[in-house]
Amino acid sequence: MADYLVEDTVKCSECGSRKLNRDETRGEIVCEDCGLVLEDNVIDQGAEWRVFSPEQGDQRARTGAPMTVMLHDKGLSTDIDWQNKDYSGKAISSRYRSQFYRMRKWQKRSRVSNATERNLAMALAELDRMASRLDLPKSIREAAAVNYKKAVEARLIRGRSIEGVAAASLYAACRQCNNPRTLDEIGEASRTGRKEIGRTYRFMVRELKMKIPPTKPEDYIPRFCSGLHLDAEVQSKAYELIAAAQEKELTSGRGPTGIAASIIYIASVLCGKRRTQREVAEVAGVTEVTIRNRYKELIQNLNIELEI
């Protein structure tokens, strides 16, 4: 067999044709025009077993789960299952259960060998809990885990609670991934207060020199509309109003959540799918007074007529 890859064979060496047929059963590559056998005894790169269902394929896989930054050891260590069953699913006899109990206990201890790994294990578990409560995607969870590990490497954890640094890392990750959450939302999901999260976040940004983009009103539109059960028509109208407001510099110096809430209120009225100011305020986490002040400024400067 030739010493080059099969994928490198792109044309026939006899007639120059590129119509090649790979026969998996015979292990040959044959030219369809002249019939020349270009390769024989081709190695099958697939598995040597037959699979009749997806479950069988998962059971016969040679590798485990991929590496992840959501675990302190990146998921590279092994784990002894808590169920007292062997590889074939049969129950382990009572004679060996105590032995497996001791092995399982020492295996858990060996995964966390020092204080740093113990800190990471606790913090990443807290991050996953908060992200699950906020229904955040995997990308944000991984970004938050990376932020926390950078804080550990820079020794920023001393004198601060694990929950506070983890919450600040998650808040920063939300802004980095253009899916911002307010400090109040992060505070409700965590075991710390809003002030501590904000103070720790500013400290991390300064010490780690993180480049966090400022939040924009349009970043909140999809989430607020989803919470109010508004369709794509209202979202599209809200984006148009935000673009018009930004052209006239009506959003500068204003809170992005207040601007987004008032824009959604105006868009819902214009599209005939009105939501009350109280409903919008509850979803956006702002007061009704803020919405009234912002929407009055917007309708006056954008020359919008509303039938309230």
Image (cartoon, helix red, strand yellow):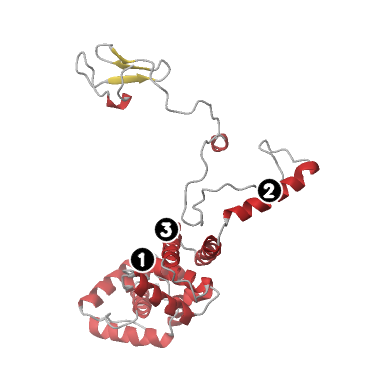
Dot 1: few (<14), some (14–19), or many (≥20) neighbours within 10 Å?
Answer: some
- Residue depth check, mark 2 versus mark 1: number of the one nearer the observer: 2
Q: Amino acid at mark 3?
A: Ser
The C terminus is located in which quarter?
bottom left
Please tell me whether mark 1 sits on a helix, a strand or a loop: helix
Say if residue 230 shows up in the picture: no
Q: Amino acid at mark 2?
A: Met
Which residue is label 1 attached to?
Answer: 176
Dot 3: few (<14), some (14–19), or many (≥20) neighbours within 10 Å?
Answer: few
Measured Cα–Cα span from mark 3 to mark 1: 10 Å
- Give me the residue at 52% from left, 71% from top: 162
Residue in the foreground of this view, choosing between 250 and 54: 54
Which residue is label 3 attached to?
Answer: 139
N-terminal of the two: label 3 or label 2?
Answer: 2
- Left or right: residue 261 compared with residue 71: left
Position of residue 87 relative to residue 4, above or below, is: below
Q: Amino acid at mark 1?
A: Gln
Measured Cα–Cα span from mark 2 to mark 1: 42 Å
